[in-house]
């Protein structure tokens, strides 16, 4: 499906960014979902980055219906989740927190002994697990004013119309209530040379990516104060994995992006490096500070 207007503000004015992304197929339970070839566009008006082509609404809905929600379960907290909990832990005890897109309630389960935790989750099976963990599941029509914080963790990038969703949620924040967005950071240096083929946009359900410019746009659009911007990696790796990812990424870029007359002949002499010459897509590069936690504060009724 071709994206006709900016998902952040509906503007039709944009700049294409870097190389195009090639089409790819994701298979779940023998069902195939094809991401069409796409380019990454940077909106001239609001600063969001987004794919020019995405799955159509029917395929996106089906993808989420059959996707294994348990793949997001983890025995350890990700660095991004640790940062979110650090912010929430500073709220007064017994604050009301809404996790929009809470999946199985894993994140909120760490706050249950201190706060009243609520969740919105479209996957019924995941919602059942969240309820068993002690999270109160609400439908979107059951939301009411009175949340001290609303959290969207790894959700923003999945939204077809993110600004409209945030405008809806914002009305339920208390004065001085916090809106926390944790998502990919389009300004991160790791993705800049080839953003369309960066791992974040090679994920079929990732439709858009936040930037500082867009965060400032949201601040004005939603009537919120932008009070914090933290950059971090979503994952935590040991030094061997860090070395492996950086080495593979360096080799791929030399052969396929920079084509350095200095480095390419040297790399071709190193068997492990030379393999990168035949790679058709970039290697996974998930070890950099390519995520941002953005915190907004409600200074008035939205």
Image: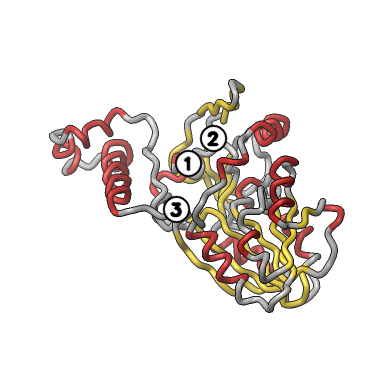
Q: Which residue, given by chain and number where applicable, does mark 1 sit on?
A: 196
In percent of width and height, residue 97 lies at 71, 65
Which quadrant: the C terminus? Answer: bottom right
Residue 133: image quadrant is bottom right
Q: How is the image coloured?
A: secondary structure
The answer, for residue 1, to whether it is visible in the render is no
* Helix, strand or loop under label 1: helix
Residue 256: image quadrant is top left
Name the residue furthest top. 30
Task: Give the mark nearest the N terminus, 1 or 2.
Answer: 2
In percent of width and height, residue 243 lies at 27, 49
Q: Which residue, given by chain and number where applicable, does mark 2 sit on?
A: 38
Which marked residue is nearer to the observer: mark 3 or mark 1?
3
The answer, for residue 28, to whether it is visible in the render is yes
* Helix, strand or loop under label 2: strand
Marks 2 and 3 in Cβ contact (< 8 Å): no
In percent of width and height, residue 28 lies at 58, 27
Q: Residue at x 76, y 60 (%)?
A: 169
In percent of width and height, residue 89 lies at 60, 73
User: Where is 69 relative to 173, above or below?
Assistant: above
Residue 106 placement, left or right of 140: left
Classify 10 Å Cα crowding around label 1: few (below 14), some (14-19), many (20 and above). Answer: many
Q: Which residue, given by chain and number where applicable, does mark 3 sit on?
A: 235
């Amino acid at each position: 499906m071709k994206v006709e207007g900016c998902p952040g503000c509906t503007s039709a004015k944009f700049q294409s960014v870097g190389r195009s992304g090639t089409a790819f197929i994701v298979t779940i339970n023998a069902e195939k979902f094809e991401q069409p070839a796409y380019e990454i566009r940077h909106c001239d008006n609001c600063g969001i980055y987004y794919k020019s082509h995405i799955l159509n609404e029917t395929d996106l809905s089906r993808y989420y219906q059959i996707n294994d929600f348990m793949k997001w379960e983890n025995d350890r907290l990700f660095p991004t989740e640790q940062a979110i909990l650090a912010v929430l832990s500073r709220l007064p005890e017994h604050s009301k927190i809404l996790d929009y897109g809470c999946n199985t309630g894993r994140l909120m389960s760490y706050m249950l002994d201190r706060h009243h935790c609520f969740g919105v989750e479209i996957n019924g099976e995941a919602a059942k697990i969240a309820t068993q963990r002690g999270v109160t599941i609400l439908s979107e029509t059951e939301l009411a004013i009175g949340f001290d914080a609303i959290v969207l963790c790894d959700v923003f990038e999945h939204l077809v119309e993110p600004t409209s969703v945030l405008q809806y949620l914002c009305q339920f924040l208390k004065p001085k209530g916090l809106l926390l967005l944790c998502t990919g950071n389009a300004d991160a240096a790791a993705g800049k040379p080839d953003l369309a083929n960066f791992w974040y946009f090679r994920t079929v359900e990732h439709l858009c990516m936040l930037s500082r410019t867009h965060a400032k746009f949201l601040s004005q659009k939603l009537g919120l104060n932008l009070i914090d911007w933290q950059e971090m990696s979503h994952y935590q790796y040991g030094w061997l994995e860090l070395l492996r990812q950086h080495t593979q990424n360096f080799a791929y870029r030399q052969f396929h992006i920079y084509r350095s007359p200095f480095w390419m002949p040297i790399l071709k002499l190193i068997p492990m490096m030379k393999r990168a010459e035949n790679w058709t897509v970039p290697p996974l590069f998930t070890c950099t500070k390519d995520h941002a936690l953005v915190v907004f504060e409600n200074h008035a009724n939205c």
